Image (cartoon, rainbow, N blue to C red):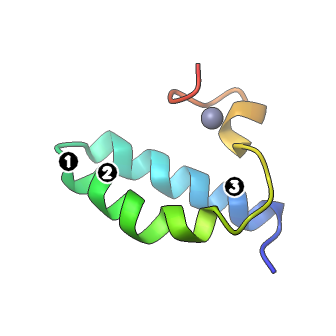
Amino acid sequence: MFGRKAAEKLDDAAAALHRIGGGTGDAIANKVIAPIRRRVDTDCTRCSRGKCKEHN
Ligand SMILES: [Zn+2]
């Protein structure tokens, strides 16, 4: 139901929340984005775009 474009948006949103930091951004990312992201059968799109700060 979710395609790669949706995965990219979710990964970007999660990364933006991580940048906010302070625990709040991470909490929102984990609570709101992560459950949706897990339903998208696509590897981290930020890694494939060379933009990922979390996996390298
Ligand atoms: Zn990644």
Name above or below for residue 44 compared with residue 17.
above
Q: Is residue 49 visible?
A: no
- Mark 1 is surrounded, within 10 Å at the Cα level, by few (under 14), some (14 to 19) or many (20 or more) other residues, namely few
Q: Amino acid at mark 1?
A: Gly
Image position of 4 (left or right of 27):
right
Residue drawn at the location 78% of the way across and 34% of the way down: 48
Q: Compare residues 24 and 41 and report the one nearer the observer.
A: 41
- Whether the residue under disc 3 has CB within 8 Å of ligand 1: no
- The amino acid marked with disc number 2 is Asp
Asked whether, in this view, residue 39 is left or right of residue 19, the answer is: right
Residue on which the image places disc 2: 26
**Measured Cα–Cα span from mark 1 to mark 2:** 5 Å
Q: Is residue 56 visible?
A: yes
Per the model, the C-alpha gap separating discs 3 and 1 is: 22 Å
Q: What label sits on residue 23 in the rendered view?
A: 1
Q: Position of residue 55 (x, y in %)?
A: 58, 27
Which of the two discs, 3 and 1, sits closer to the camera? 1
Circles 1 and 2: CB atoms closer than 8 Å: yes
Residue visible at 42% across and 49% down in the picture: 16
User: Circle 1 — which element?
Assistant: loop
Quick one: which residue is furthest to the top in this view? Answer: 56
Q: Is residue 18 above or below residue 47?
A: below
What label sits on residue 4 in the rendered view? Answer: none
Cβ–Cβ below 8 Å for labels 2 and 3?
Answer: no
**Mark 2 and mark 3: span between their CA atoms?**
18 Å
In the image, 44: left or right of 14?
A: right
